[in-house]
Amino acid sequence: MPSPIAHLTAAYVAQRIGMAYPPYPNGETPHFGRRLLLTTATFSILPDIDAVAGLLAGDFARYHNEGTHSLLVGAGLSLGFAGIMAWRRRGFGFWFLMAAGCYYAHILMDAATPGRGVLAAWPISNRRFDFPLTLFYGLHWSDGWISVRHIWTVLTELTFAAVTALVVFALDGRKGAGG
Ligand SMILES: [Zn+2]
């Protein structure tokens, strides 16, 4: 698994995409941007909620990276969330895509990090899936709180965050200049 730095970077990108395609006319929802960021950030780190259970129980490995990293669980949570968000307003499809997109990006990023793979098809299958490409150095939580490897994790993911932010700024600038 990558650290929350990489997952929150993905949340930021998703928020920028969502801001470009809002489901409501401009000005209709004054806190739309903030609400959207809260949504993308939450769903980008939600699969790791099991890590909290593991930390509380003092046995991280036993709880972490189990059923919460399933595509079906992600779809169910996103459907429920979109239903609540669209209760009084429109935008069911928008909120579903934002939530599920972030949840699935998390699962994909975890699968692209060295580890034991993700239970993407749980509860249908207990097979663990690994992405054929390694994209992240990842968090080596089995090392405990203090480890030299954590420095490398933070450095690589801060670089990933900085490069991603630069690309987003560049694209935003071009869009601003063009339109
Ligand atoms: Zn994870």
Image (spheres, rainbow, N blue to C red):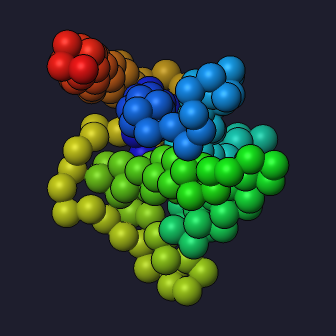
Q: Is residue 18 rendered to the left or right of residue 129?
A: right
User: In this view, which residue lies farthest toward the bottom?
Assistant: 124
Q: Is residue 84 visible?
A: no
Which image quadrant is residue 159 in?
top left
Q: Is residue 129 above or below residue 90?
A: below
Q: Residue at x 62, y 50 (%)?
A: 91
Q: Residue at x 28, y 38 (%)?
A: 137
Q: Is residue 31 visible?
A: yes
Q: Residue at x 57, y 72 (%)?
A: 72
Q: Is residue 175 rendered to the left or right of residue 122?
A: left
14, 106: nearer the viewer: 14
Where residue 178 appears, x then y in whole percent?
18, 19
Where residue 46 appears, x then y in whole percent?
62, 46
91, 27: nearer the viewer: 27
Q: Quadrant of the C terminus?
A: top left
Q: Is residue 91 above or below residue 36?
A: below
42, 115: nearer the viewer: 42
Where residue 164 appears, x then y in whole percent?
27, 25
Q: Residue at x 44, y 64 (%)?
A: 118
178, 97: nearer the viewer: 178
In this figure, what is the number of numbered marks?
Answer: 0
